[in-house]
Amino acid sequence: MNKTTNLAALIMATAVLTWACSPEDDHHGSMNGDTEHEEMDHDEMDGHQETDRHEDEGQHDDHGDVHGDSSDHHDDGEGHDASPPENVNEYALEGLMVENTKNVTRISEDDPVLFSVKASQTIWPATHEDNQPGTVILAPLDEWQYALASLTLVHHPNDGPLLYFDGALTDEVVAEMERLQPKGNSEGIEVMVMGELNEVDQNKLEGFEVEHLTADDPAAFAAIIDEHYAELSFIEQSLKFYYCKLTGSEAASTLF
């Protein structure tokens, strides 16, 4: 908003200075020209008004034609609505040995906990640092409000999967965290636990930098998540800013 205001003020000041610095003859010429126009006889003015009236009528007619054509185009468009394909091949699924296509990856799993593990393995190969996650998020399966709010932290700035726990951490979930070897977010947190986790399962996370987020009700928890997201984002942007400043990068000016 400040940049827009300053730019508008600069443009206005330039226009005023340009007018003020122009030769006086130009101003007098403009004034004399205005006087000459004022002395135009009534017959010429009537002629101009008549011409303008006919031109306006012609423009209205043209607009009418344009609107008419537009309605015709809308009418024609009704015949292009989406429709199911014709001539379906009823044998397409017989003998099929794959589930995926070149554009679609399907994950077949009825257990939500195992599904979260398979989804993690599909998105994060974790073969090297560039495709390892930052932070793994553990969310309770039996409290969907907490899990839903936790999804806010899946992407920036944590960039990691959400894995479910149903009362306790399963061996598959623990093994997946070991496979991923999360790098940590801007605060070095490798695992974020949403809600309550029993002491036995907390001991399974001893090898990770862990942060717990919980609240008495879903609304309060969502507020905590929102505040936490803002804090992490600010820290990451600040780190990028100072890095760009130290390296002399021009990108620093675009971060704030």
Image (tube, grey):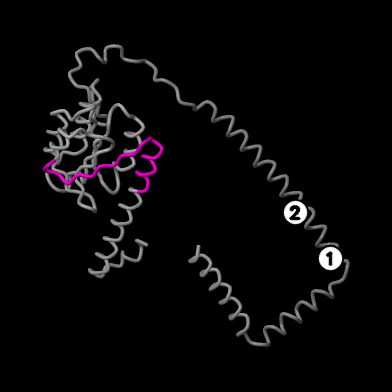
Kindly indicate the quadrant of the structure image that contains residue 213. top left
- Horizontal and vertical percent for residue 65? 67, 41
Tell me if label 2 and label 1 are in contact, CB under 8 Å.
Answer: no
Residue closer to the observer: 26 or 93: 93
Residue at the spot x=64%, y=42% of the render? Answer: 66
Compare marks 2 and 1 and give the one earlier in the sequence.
1
Q: Secondary structure at mark 1?
A: helix
Q: What's the amino acid at mark 1? A: Met
Q: What's the amino acid at mark 2? A: Glu
* Magenta part of the chain: 206-227
Measured along the vertical axis of the image, is residue 211 above or below residue 240?
A: above
Q: In the drawing, does residue 99 fall left or right of residue 250?
A: left
Check disc 2: other Cα within 10 Å, few if <14, some if 14-19, many if 20+. few
Check disc 1: other Cα within 10 Å, few if <14, some if 14-19, many if 20+. few
Measured along the vertical axis of the image, is residue 31 above or below residue 55?
A: below
Residue closer to the observer: 146 or 85: 146
Is residue 225 part of the magenta span, yes or no?
yes
Kindly give the residue lying farthest to the right in the view shown.
Answer: 42
Q: Secondary structure at mark 2?
A: helix
Residue with the mark numbered 1: 45
Label drawn at residue 55: 2
Label drawn at residue 216: none
Residue at the spot x=30%, y=61% of the render? Answer: 238
Measured along the vertical axis of the image, is residue 238 above or below residue 39?
A: above
- Horizontal and vertical percent for residue 36? 80, 78
